[in-house]
């Protein structure tokens, strides 16, 4: 039930256009990109490969609504671009990945290097898939235009070689274009519906952009979902005219 409510809120938030006549292109939330090395102050938690380590390939099972169930390797698929990789349990999938969706899309679109983005859901069953995939068709297509999404065949523990901390609901890894880990962000709780500023700073570092530049992309441009929806509407109108 929590996933359904969260997804509904995300749809409403992303579909709402900015109505201010004075600042029609700016984000309602003031995004900041901060030093990723100050992500955790105090006791440090470890989950997954650490900076300097190379990501190992592993298989992921796509959600049934994506396409035929053919396993794929997100590490191999992400090579050639910096990689934004989310490991998340099924306690609140929509909230966790929705918070970073616009940022991942914008960084991929505006940076010189681009950004690959993948989501690996950690669960011993796939009951949450029913809740997660019963969302608005247009919003669902946008999710899949940003992320490669699938379930770990290894369940809640994730890929055996990764050493993910099962007591943490979400771990984010940023790697370079060759698959070498640059940043690791272990989350004690699923973040709120805006991207964590330290992760935004990590994204900036991964694509070799200034943190201020990445923050300005999010603050001064229309959300990716708005552009995605407009493009779909334009395509439908053209088809209708034909």
Image: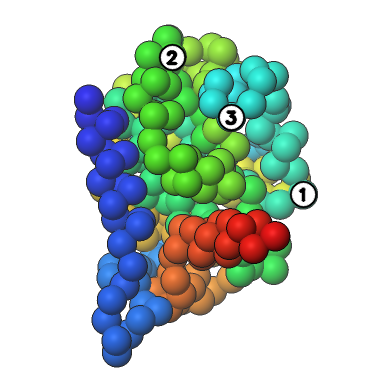
The reply to whether discs 1 and 2 touch (Cβ–Cβ < 8 Å) is no
On residue 53, the disc is none
Q: Are marks 3 and 1 in contact (CB under 8 Å)?
A: no
Viewer-nearest of discs 3 and 1? 3
Q: Which residue is mark 3?
A: 66
Q: Earlier in the sequence, mark 3 or mark 2?
A: 3
For the residue carrying disc 2, how many other residues have a C-alpha within 10 Å: few (<14), some (14-19), or many (20+)?
A: some
Residue 37 at least partly seen: no
Nearer-the-camera pick, 33 or 28: 28
Residue holding disc 1: 80
Q: Which corner quadrant holds the C terminus?
A: bottom right
Mark positioned earlier in the residue sequence (1 or 2): 1
Q: Earlier in the sequence, mark 3 or mark 1?
A: 3
In which quarter of the view is residue 96 placed?
top left
Give the quarter of the image for residue 78.
top right
Check disc 2 and report the residue beneath it.
126
Query: In this rendering, does residue 96 appear at all?
Result: yes
Q: Residue at x 33, y 68 (%)?
A: 17
Residue at 40% from the left image edge and 40% from the top image edge = 136
Image location (x, y in percent) of residue 185: 43, 43
Query: Which residue is drawn at the image coordinates 66% and 20% (left, top)?
Result: 68
């Amino acid at each position: 039930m929590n996933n359904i409510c969260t997804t509904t809120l995300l749809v409403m938030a992303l579909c709402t256009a900015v109505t201010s006549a004075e600042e029609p292109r700016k984000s309602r939330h003031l995004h900041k990109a901060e030093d990723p090395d100050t992500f955790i102050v105090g006791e440090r938690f470890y989950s997954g490969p650490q900076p300097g380590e190379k990501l190992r390939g592993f298989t992921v099972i796509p959600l049934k609504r994506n396409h035929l169930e053919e396993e794929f390797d997100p590490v191999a698929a992400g090579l050639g671009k910096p990689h934004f990789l989310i490991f998340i349990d099924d306690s609140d999938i929509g909230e966790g990945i929705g918070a970073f969706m616009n940022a991942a899309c914008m960084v991929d679109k505006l940076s010189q290097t681009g950004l690959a983005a993948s989501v690996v859901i950690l669960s011993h069953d796939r009951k949450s898939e029913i809740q997660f995939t019963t969302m608005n068709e247009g919003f669902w297509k946008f999710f899949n235009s940003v992320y490669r999404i699938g379930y770990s065949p290894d369940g809640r523990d994730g890929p055996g070689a990764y050493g993910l901390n099962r007591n943490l609901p979400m771990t984010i890894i940023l790697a370079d274009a060759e698959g070498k880990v640059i940043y690791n962000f272990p989350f004690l709780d699923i973040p709120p519906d805006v991207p964590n500023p330290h992760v935004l700073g990590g994204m900036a570092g991964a694509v070799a952009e200034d943190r201020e530049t990445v923050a300005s992309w999010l603050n001064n441009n229309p959300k990716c979902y708005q552009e995605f929806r407009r493009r779909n509407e334009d395509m439908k109108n053209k088809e209708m005219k034909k």
